[in-house]
Amino acid sequence: MATCPPDVPQRIGIFGGTFDPVHLAHLRLARAFRDEIALDQVRLIPAGQPYHRSARPQASPVQRLAMLDAALAGEPGLVSDAREIRRPRYAYTVETLQELRAELGAQAELWFLIGADSLEKLHTWHRWPQLLQLANLAVAIRPGFDAAQLDPAVAAHWQARQVSDFSNRTPSGTIRALALPPITLSATDIRQQLATGQDCSALLSPPVLAYIRQHRLYT
Ligand code: ATP
C-alpha cells in the first residue's frame, strides 16, 4: 500500500516595504531571498502609513499596490499581500507576523526579510524580540557590515541564533545572513529622477514605469 508523504510545512518569506515605487533592487532582493532560502512563496507587503518615516508615501496605497502587482506578474513565487494597507491604522510588523502565523499554522516556516540598515535599528521596533518567536530572520547584509555596531541586545540574538546552513530548519527563531551584491538604488532617488524628467527605464520594470506615466506619479 502506498504511504502518504508527510506534510511538508510551507516556507513563506515576508518582505515589507513602502514600495513607493517598487524598483529593480526590491525585485532582485525578493528573488535572491526566495532562491537562497528555497521559499515556496515570498509575500511583498506594502506598508500603510509608516510611523517611522517623516515623509508620507507620495503614491497612494492603492497605487503602490497596483505597481507592486504589475511588477510581480510572471515572477514565480512572488506575490503581493495587501493586509497592511487595508488596515484602518498603522500595522506594526509584529502584528502582521502574528496574523500570518495564525493563518499559516504553527508548523509553517516563516522568514522575515530585513536589510542590514533595518537590523541596526531593530531595537527601536515595537516588541522586536517577539519577531524572532514568530519568524526566522533573513538579513540582507552588504560588504562592510559590522555586527559590532549593533545594539547589544540585538547583537546577542545575532550571535546566538545565526545559522549558516539549513540542516536544522525551524518554524521560527533562527537568523540567516544573506550576502548579496550591493545595488545602489533607492525609491527616493527614483522619485527625484522622475520629478526632474530623467529616464528611469533601467531602474523600474516596464509595467511599473508605464503605470507611473499613465497616472502621472512623482511629477
Ligand atoms: P525609500 O528610498 O523611499 O526609503 P527604498 O528604496 O529604501 O525606499 P523601501 O520600500 O523602503 O525602499 O524598501 C523596502 C526594503 O527593501 C527595505 O528593507 C530596504 O532595506 C530594502 N532595499 C531597498 N533598496 C535596496 C537596495 N538597493 N539594496 C538592498 N536592499 C534594499
Image: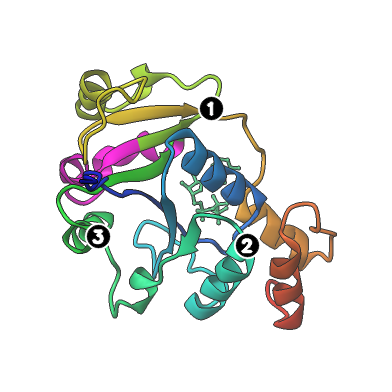
Callout 1 amino acid: Arg
Viewer-closest of 75 and 118: 75
Residue extent of the magenta highlight: 117-137
Residue 74, disc: 2
Question: Where residue 139 appears, x then y in whole percent?
Answer: 40, 34
**Residue type, numbered disc 3:** Leu
Does the closest atom of ligand 1 sit within 8 Å of the Cβ of label 1?
A: yes
Please tell me which residue lies in front, 178 or 165: 165
Position of 98 relative to 141 (above/below): below
Q: Is disc 1 in contact with disc 3, using a CB cutoff of under 8 Å?
A: no
Residue for point 54% across, 71% down: 64
Tag 2 or tag 1, which sits nearer the N-term? 2
**Res 70 label:** none
Tell me residue 102's x, y (percent). Answer: 16, 61
Circle 1 sits on which residue? 142
10 Å crowding of disc 3: few (<14), some (14-19), many (20+): some
Q: How many marks?
A: 3
| Quadrant where the image shows the C terminus | bottom right
Instruction: Give x and y (percent) for residue 42.
Output: 44, 53
Q: Earlier in the sequence, mark 1 or mark 3?
A: 3
| Residue linked to disc 3 | 100
Q: CA distance from mark 1 to mark 2?
A: 28 Å
Q: Secondary structure at mark 1?
A: loop
Q: Is residue 13 visible?
A: yes
Q: Is residue 42 above or below residue 168?
A: below
